[in-house]
Image (cartoon, coloured by chain):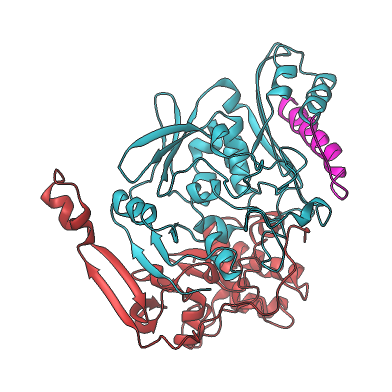
Amino acid sequence: MNNFSYLQATQPKEATGAVRDNQQAAFIAGGTTLLDLMKLNVETHDQLVDINMLAFKGIEQTADGLRIGALERMSDVGENPLVMQQYPVISQSLLLAASPQLRNMASIGGNLLQRTRCGYFRDTAFPCNKRQPGSGCPAQEGENRGLAILGGSKDCIATFPGDLAVALVALDAVLLLENAKGKQRRVPLVDFHLLPGSTPQRETVLEPGELIVSVTVPAAAHTRKSMYLKVRERSSYAYALASAAVGLDVQGGQIRSARVALGGVGTKPWRSREAEKVLTGAPATEATFRAAAAAALREAQPREHNRFKVELAQNTLVRALTELTA
Amino acid sequence: MTDNFPPDSADRPDGPVPSDGRRSFIKQATGFLGLALAPPLISQAERLTAISKKVEGVTEMRLKVNGTVRTISAEPRVTLLDALREKLDLTGSKKGCDHGQCGACTVLVDGRRINSCLTLAVMNQGKEITTVEGLAKGEELHPLQASFIEHDGFQCGYCTPGQLMSGVACLKEGHAKTDGDVREWMSGNLCRCGAYPNIVAAIRQVEKSGFKS
């Protein structure tokens, strides 16, 4: 790990200002992604700004729904009774992610900014357009078994690795951001992560120095009846090969509203309006679920080693919808 | 393992000892940086709480480990794991992968289990750190240590300190009520020898004994 200076910030402006004014600086909260990547020299920073003293805390019911402070830890949100009962898909996505130790460390804001596990990105011996713009993408023709089948480009097919963001994007979550001028803005999570296109190094809409303050999730019938299904190569402590976050409001066998997002298959947390369109107003039957899954994967562009994900993701979505309505 | 895990590089450029010869560069600026940056309308009381701390180069840090406050000199980039092992001679916590994938470095910070390889020593000042060396009371083993011996919860022993610390936390959290629970909630601790069935048995016995940590 390269050497760096450390600044413990006590006010948001101090933290955001330090990172805005120094392109080589980065925020640190839990550190579980950052220090991992700094040890690999994938990220190098000359200053780390510790934001753990900032008051971005709290897990609470508001008039409209749920509010989670960005510095809450994954474990605390995952095991929060309100979240478990009213927003099960959020709790499940958290408790199926990482390990208990990492969940005790990792913050909610940092988790949403988790970086890809693409082996080429993580190994500086290889070219990577995300790490070194313009250097190339060996994943296109290389080891792409774990990589994305939705949202990729000729420059990058790196999978977004997270689980929480998939659950949150399904439930129309909105992020509250704050920049170095102290100005706050709200960004729907679905618009927060960017498709790689020709600029895979740009992963989110965050401005230099801008911080995630909190996440809000509007309450609805489909938030309470929701679940997260994660398919992995071992039963715990692994990234998703495919996952599905689903929320349904079913009355008299008819689906009144539906929320669907997929993980492990997209270059960003993958909200599927196509699947939702099929589900909404249709009977809650396996035929409907199959049609929704087909719609969700219609645009899939698999590579040599990840063709299996097209069927796996569909089956994952069908099983999630089936279990939720059982 | 999924192929999302990278091909590992044998010559990781990390480690606790800097080779750049800059250890003589010592600088610690502790001051009212927040005050200087605070907007003029902020109240006096708020200003006085805004004490920021900047650390650069080799600096004195105070870590409270197993009930004792100890002082070390280290750069901000030194992880808690390296500080424990290299500066405090507490080599019970092991460096397996150094990337948060194996759990051999698990310690408790303020009673919660964490991977000490993925946090900085400088960030853990003022916290209660418990390592495997702090589990026994003198010659009296912690019940989970005794149970590991009884159930043969290890072969080579390398992962054992992490398994013990994670197991103690798992019991305290109430996540050891069934064998399945233990397997799920101990999944962050890998054992290449494959002592898993015996580790589960050891933790379950302590849970059934009603031990409260």
Chain B rendered in what hue? red
Q: Please name whichever residue, A41 or A103, is drawn nearer the observer in this view of the structure.
A: A41
Residue drawn at (42%, 63%) of the image = A48
Residue A104: x and y in percent read 51, 57
The image position of residue A259, as x and y in percent, is: 65, 25
Give residue A218's position: percent from left, percent from top: 49, 26
- Residues shaded magenta: A299-326
Visible in this render: residue A2? yes
In the image, is A152 to the left or to the right of A310? left
Identify the main secondary structure in magenta: helix
Chain A tint in image: cyan
B2 horizontally vs A92: left or right: right
| Residue B126 lies within the magenta run | no
The answer to whether B122 appears left or right of A203 in the picture is: left
Which corner quadrant of the image does residue B152 belong to? bottom right
From what the image shows, is residue A59 above or below residue B22?
A: above
The quarter of the picture where the C terminus of chain A appears is: top right
